[in-house]
Amino acid sequence: MLSKICSGRKANISNNNDLSKRAILMQIFISFLANLSVLSPKMGLGFPAILSLLMIKDEKLTEEQFSWFASITAIACPIGGVLAAFCCDKIGRKATIIVTDIISIIQWAMIAFSNESDSKLLFAELIIARVLTGISIGMCNTICSLFIRDLPSKNLWKFTHTEHFYACCGHIHNLYNREFHSASIYALSIIIFSTIACFFVPETPVYLVTKNKLYEARKALSMLHNVYKYDSKIDDEIRQIQEIRLSSSTNDESKSSAFMVIQQISGIHVIYIFAAQFVQEADVTIDEFVATAIIGIIRCVGTLLVGFISDITGRKSIAIVSTLFIFWHSRNYILLAIDSFAFHFLSDWNCWSSYSIIYNGWRSFSTKNQRTWSQNFTVICILFKLFHY
């Protein structure tokens, strides 16, 4: 697999130079460290799934309070998108990821050490934490995708554009965990580790060249290409970054927006946020938390499959298949909603198909002009995060 990638042409700037295997592994490792910041915030997105039954059953929250708890995140997501788009051009991609991690640390600490003895205080703490969750989700969606787009080789995107896979892993743990304090501590430990790891991640060359920090850009490119001595190819790449002044493609952004519209109205977010309740109401014989974890596992598998299949068949083919899956399963779910088997089948495959849509949506954004891309991304983030619930 690596040999095939090595023989492929380097994408972002220079198209004439092959990447070494060590450079490939270096870029995959760096993207892995950067994408760790997605895991903890996305665990917060599916957090209501484990609290919906526990909190209401134990009468710690009323149904109205829990409704606010579940939906306030969607209101706060656009704030995170705006903040990330502003910070990524002002303080850099790396620093913005660290800011996102710090916000996640605060919100998980508030949940982990919340006071259950006082229901009013508990509700206030959870609401504040959920607002911070929404901000961190909006920020990580923006900055992590942008960070990966700045890597030198797009041939590695199926390996490096994996934040959605990490998000699925977070959902699996959260959905299976019955005690929200332990889940919060687990998420807190992950985000602390990812914050420390980010200090070892280089700033993206595109941002450094944009800010005319050429010395730092050379160091970053040398690290990404695993070159630790003078190489004229590094200078050539920097010059080409400086010369690129192409406008972003409105057509590409329109396609990406269409992907996101389909994904949002498919109901995927409703499924994995209220998964435990849905399974319970469908009278499924297996444990509701196990069933929701199965949904997360299938989403993980689907995300990995789409990453590889889309590079073989193209994004157009996988998008058509995914859209047909959404239509067919949604139709059957309406007709067979009372059937527990239909619920499992349709929910699981709806997760897979709709997630391939959102995966392709993020990957389809134009990278011809990084500044225009990040500004347009802010608007799109605001529009689509409002439809999460």
Image: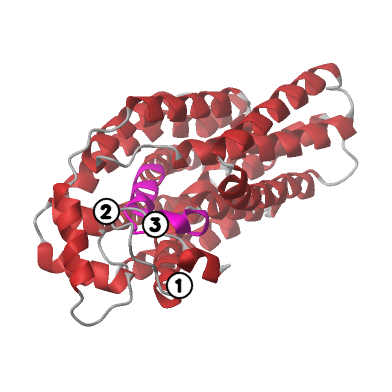
- The mark that comes first in sequence, 1 or 3, is 1
Is 346 above or below relative to 86?
Answer: above
**Label 3 sits on residue:** 105
- The mark that comes first in sequence, 2 or 1, is 1
Q: Is residue 148 magenta?
A: yes
**Over which residues does the magenta segment extend?**
141-160
Is 353 above or below relative to 223?
Answer: above
**Label 1 sits on residue:** 25
Q: Amino acid at mark 1?
A: Leu
Residue 283 shows up from this direction: no
Local secondary structure at mark 1:
helix
Is 266 above or below relative to 377?
Answer: above
Task: Tell which tag, 1 or 3, sits nearer the viewer.
Answer: 1
Q: Identify the disc placed on residue 141.
A: none
Q: Position of residue 313 (x, y in %)?
A: 62, 43
**Cα separation between marks 1 and 3:** 29 Å
Residue visible at 40% across and 67% down in the picture: 27
**Label 2 sits on residue:** 93
Q: Amino acid at mark 3?
A: Ile
Q: Residues within 10 Å of mark 2 (few under 14, many from 20)?
A: many
Q: Position of residue 384 (x, y in %)?
A: 44, 26
Tell me: 147 left or right of 343.
Answer: left
**Cα separation between marks 2 and 1:** 21 Å
Report the predominant secondary structure element of the magenta stretch.
helix
- Between residue 299 and residue 308, name the one nearer to us: 308
Q: Position of residue 331 (x, y in %)?
A: 77, 19
Q: Is residue 6 magenta?
A: no
- Between residue 387 and residue 133, name the one nearer to us: 387
Residue visible at 51% across and 43% down in the picture: 118
**Cα separation between marks 3 and 2:** 19 Å
